[in-house]
Image (spheres, coloured by chain):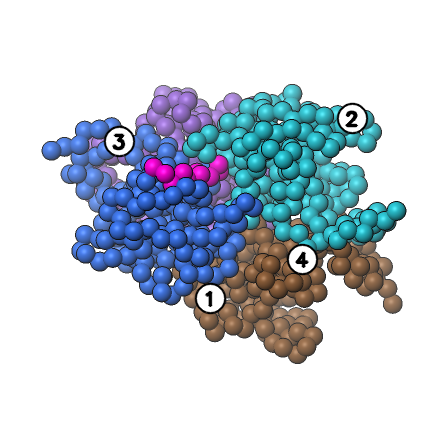
Chain colours: A cyan, B brown, C blue, D purple
Amino acid sequence: MTDTSPGWLAPDTLEQARAQMPILYVDAVPVRVDDRGEVTAVGLLLRIGPDGTVSRAVVSGRVLHHERVRDALLRHLEKDLGPMAFPKIPASPQPFTIAEYFPTQGITPYHDPRQHAVSLAYAVPVTGEAAPRQDALDFVWFTPQEAASDAVQRETTGGHGLLIKQALAHLGCSF
Amino acid sequence: MTDTSPGWLAPDTLEQARAQMPILYVDAVPVRVDDRGEVTAVGLLLRIGPDGTVSRAVVSGRVLHHERVRDALLRHLEKDLGPMAFPKIPASPQPFTIAEYFPTQGITPYHDPRQHAVSLAYAVPVTGEAAPRQDALDFVWFTPQEAASDAVQRETTGGHGLLIKQALAHLGCSF
Amino acid sequence: MTDTSPGWLAPDTLEQARAQMPILYVDAVPVRVDDRGEVTAVGLLLRIGPDGTVSRAVVSGRVLHHERVRDALLRHLEKDLGPMAFPKIPASPQPFTIAEYFPTQGITPYHDPRQHAVSLAYAVPVTGEAAPRQDALDFVWFTPQEAASDAVQRETTGGHGLLIKQALAHLGCSF
Amino acid sequence: MTDTSPGWLAPDTLEQARAQMPILYVDAVPVRVDDRGEVTAVGLLLRIGPDGTVSRAVVSGRVLHHERVRDALLRHLEKDLGPMAFPKIPASPQPFTIAEYFPTQGITPYHDPRQHAVSLAYAVPVTGEAAPRQDALDFVWFTPQEAASDAVQRETTGGHGLLIKQALAHLGCSF
């Protein structure tokens, strides 16, 4: 059965588009900040992939047709962290980096076997309580040092480990 | 006849994709800088549209499947400014802004009647001589103040006037 | 009488330092944002100068010895907007620009007759109610378009008009 | 004997200022880029400190009274890398981060026992040949991975190791 809601692609069309053009994504790195805006923790999802492998990941997803980038950020954060997370979308549309996920390994530090995706990456303060939903097994807060540690970095895939370090660097965290 | 080179879409498929997902673009604002990196001029194309209207515009174009963002910038700059322009692509992938072109007017300051395009915007120093090509009638250097003036801003369409002012603001130019 | 609190300079020493080195400042542009982080208004102080002239200005002030930049932002925002403004200091230390105020006119777009000051400029969402204090006569919210209008720009001095436009450009506002 | 050239402080006055206000610095991370602007190497100085300890460091120095930030960058790069390095100062004044060096350890990741310095940090492409001068023993190009490695990071002091990783993160390098 075909999904006919606006902005969504029928699976066939999505497959066809993925083979022919870069797909626009957003990546959101959830963070806790103190009263002065300083980052005290980084939140990561624990995901189970189609092949059963478990990995830690930032919030990530596609931007739909006729959807604002900030609405896509809100939608994916609510989908993954639940309705009580209260994310504060940054006022500036300037992302801290652009992550280019290639279906071929080694062209960039980012990799997505399904598609060529280009993702606008933002750090997003979360002020409420996050409760993992959908395909996430868990959501865990790490100190910046833990998030950049070999132990956590090894549990990421597709370049999310680098993306976390890029967010920490942008946020002025020591790691 | 259908273009079958990799990365290019058949016209039908491009039309279909445009109706169903945001298309990834790059916008490049060509600038002249002095020995200390300070911007002295902004370069704008004079374009003639399908309906015969003439407008001033920055360099702009689609990112292809399996193409790096920096390669797309180089390709579109060479296509529009010729092979002797010698653009210096910025080292950092962080764009100065994201321009969201909507097919519906008024949702964002940017507008593209053909499609929903999301563009990564960069200021690109050009050190050689630009010679307009393709559908450009001319390429003219303006002082930052001229580029932000009402006279030049009125000659832009689709939000390129704002994009020029955003570039000038990012570059520390007075306007 | 000499102010002996740590971080403060005796008036003589401050005068001497001002004549001999750049003084570090922070500039904060107060903004209102909606639920998706989009800026809806820009707040400006109405100040009366030592010579009796009235002007609109952003929040601005010196960073003290052994004071963090984010603490200086909080201190000056509270001093100018009162204790109920609840400013949200950005998580990232990256300013949207650096404003170089020279005592000589025309070297940069910014000017401060008292000193050479270099200011780190941030846009700061304010969620509470601002009440002007100290030497401010009033604090008024403007739409982004009003803040960039000739009428308001003419009421600014020393380059604050440009700084407001740079903030709006960084925040993706139309102006 | 007292240095009386404009912009320079007599040693006594500099000591006095250092004890009473933050000193404005610039940090420049020299990089090699390829034709598409992609970073291929990071250059580090090998310095000998007053106590005889040897460390790797980025180019760093004070901004003088009435000196533009971009002129300070050029001056310190030429002083440390020689006249044939041909650094390309970025067009935008927006630094990739602000490094707050405190005389007290542990307040921020950066430390300078002599003073409270706040540094505007830029990545600067160098197109010519660098020859270390002044108090530098050597200048060595590293791959991004080497520059972020434990071996090189251990040879840095005062937070320069973190600053190098922040530059790499901003530049989209894998590390």
Tag 1, which secondary structure? helix
Tell me where residue B41 appears, x and y as whole percent: 47, 64
Percent x, y of residue D154:
51, 22
* Res. B122 visible in picture: yes
Residue type indicated by callout 3: Gly
Q: Residue at x 63, y 51 (%)?
A: A68
Q: Residue A2 or B68: which is nearer the viewer?
A: A2
Image quadrant where one finds the N terminus of chain D: top left
Amino acid type assigned to the residue bearing label 1 in the image: Ala
Residue linked to disc 2: A53
Work out whether D22 lies above or below B5. above
Q: Which residues are magenta?
A: C83-92
Three-letter residue code for mark 2 = Thr
Rendering quarter of residue A119 = top right
Find residue A46 and report its horizontal and vertical position in percent: 69, 26
**Quarter of the view holding residue B34:** bottom left
Circle 4 residue: B117
Does residue C98 appear to the left or right of B81 in the view shown?
A: left
Q: What secondary structure is the magenta-colored segment mainly?
A: loop
